[in-house]
Image: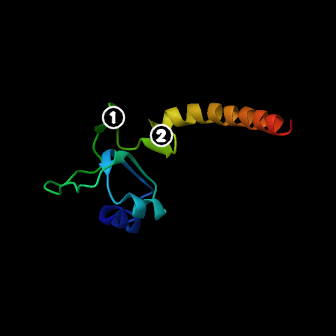
Amino acid sequence: ELLASEAARRGVAGMVIDGNCRDTPILLQMSLPIFCRGRHPNAGTAKRRGAVNVEISMGGVTVRPGDYVLGDDDGVVVCSGEELREWLPKAEAIQEVESAMLSHVQSG
């Protein structure tokens, strides 16, 4: 809750945690999207500070400064700007087809 509140205050768009988090009921009420592996009641440690704008690995995926990290209720995707420009039109086309199919199904 404390870290998420400070992140929101600083304008962070969202958080991805390669582990568990706590204070979930409060976090779910915040407008800051938080993606994590699960929930756990114990607090983490603050013994060492992290770094910014460095390459990291999360869940076996390399995340580099400048990469896009996109998430929703189904999961998180990491891609470069080039990959995003390549994939986005394809994803939008799939969404259009699926939306039309859903309308057809719903109309009987």
Viewport quadrant of the N terminus: bottom left
Q: CA distance from mark 1 to mark 2?
A: 12 Å
Q: Of callouts 1 and 2, which one flags the residue occurring earlier in the amino acid sequence?
A: 1
> Looking at the image, which residue is at 86% across and 39% down?
107
- Residue lying furthest left: 47
Please state which amino acid type lies under the numbered disc 2: Gly
Residue closer to the observer: 56 or 18: 18
Q: Secondary structure at mark 1?
A: loop
Residue 50 spot, x, y in % from top left: 22, 51
> Looking at the image, which residue is at 68% across and 36% down?
95
Q: Which residue is mark 2?
A: 75
Viewport quadrant of the C terminus: top right
Please state which amino acid type lies under the numbered disc 1: Gly
* Depicted 103 relative to depicted 7: above or below: above
Q: Which residue is mark 1?
A: 59
> Can residue 47 be spotted in the picture?
yes
Q: Secondary structure at mark 2?
A: strand
- Residue lying furthest bottom: 9
